[in-house]
Amino acid sequence: MVEKMKKRRIGVVGFGHLGQYLVEEILKRDDLELSFVWNRTVSELRGKVDEKYILENLPSFPDRTPDLIVEVAHPSITVNYGEGFLDVADYMIGSPTALANPDIENKLRDKAASGTHGIYIPSGALWGGIDIKKMADRGTLKGLKVTMKKHPSSYKLNEPLKSRNALVKSEATVLYDGCIRDLCPLAPNNVNTMAAAALAAHNLGFDKAQGCIVADPSLKAHIVEVDVFGPGEVQNQFTVKTVRHNPAAVGAVTGNATYASFLSSLLGAHSQGPGLHLC
């Protein structure tokens, strides 16, 4: 007699568009079970999620015995609860810009390395993350630049980028071009792809991996360009360039294809043990 496989219990932190999508998909599947859903504004959950799944107080998450906790809310969740989550379950960080703070990154890496649960970083809009990591593992990754192009209304920025973005009316404008670490606190909701790239490119990290964001009023898509530089002289250097064109409504922070990418990452976020893993 074949033993029935135990369903993985998933806790979802955040109930924006992406959180809602993940909850709906989890409830459809036979191999997953919804452990809990938490949202900063509990009233947003009423009438949309069965009461038995609603977690009103996030610190009580251990009572729901999750196998995997998925954050799709805000980087502050990782800052405040990341270590505690790892005491109980694997943890998938949907807002890895939190790890641009070196103290937070070091604490979480140490916690994940010393315990029994792992950190999982979803690829999101990043194409080729595993290949970037392979090059970093071998020490052959010499440079990395991620360029993101969106309609100005799709950015949620902090100053001084917020004011700079507000001035964009007709021409495509570069809002930032520099290291990813400095960009993350200025655009914490928009550059998680870049944070994931910096983590994949671990021999470069947040300081040497480069990020560029462009506001372009003509766009009805999110475009992510990834430029990878390997060994060799400038005239004869190994390079790879990918361009991801993801249709998105004007004003949307997350493009259409990224929803499915997150679900795929969730399905793969298990059984890799302690440490930090791309998924």
Image (tube, rainbow, N blue to C red):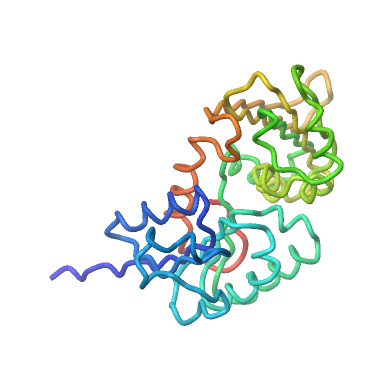
Nearer-the-camera pick, 262 or 175 = 175
The residue drawn where x is 43% and y is 65% is 10
The residue drawn where x is 51% and y is 40% is 258
Residue 249, position in %: x, y?
A: 54, 30
The residue drawn where x is 50% and y is 74% is 56
- Judge whether 32 appears above or below 252 on screen: below
| Numbered circles on residues, count | 0
Nearer-the-camera pick, 1 or 155 = 155
Q: Quadrant of residue 242?
A: top right
Nearer-the-camera pick, 250 or 19 = 250
Residue 3, position in %: x, y?
A: 20, 71
Q: Is residue 207 left or right of residue 73?
A: right
Q: Is residue 26 left or right of residue 96?
A: left
Nearer-the-camera pick, 263 or 113 = 263
- Judge whether 164 appears above or below 268 on screen: above
Residue 172, position in %: x, y?
A: 75, 20
Residue 152, position in %: x, y?
A: 70, 30
Q: Quadrant of the N terminus?
A: bottom left
The residue drawn where x is 58% and y is 39% is 125
Q: Quadrant of residue 209?
A: top right
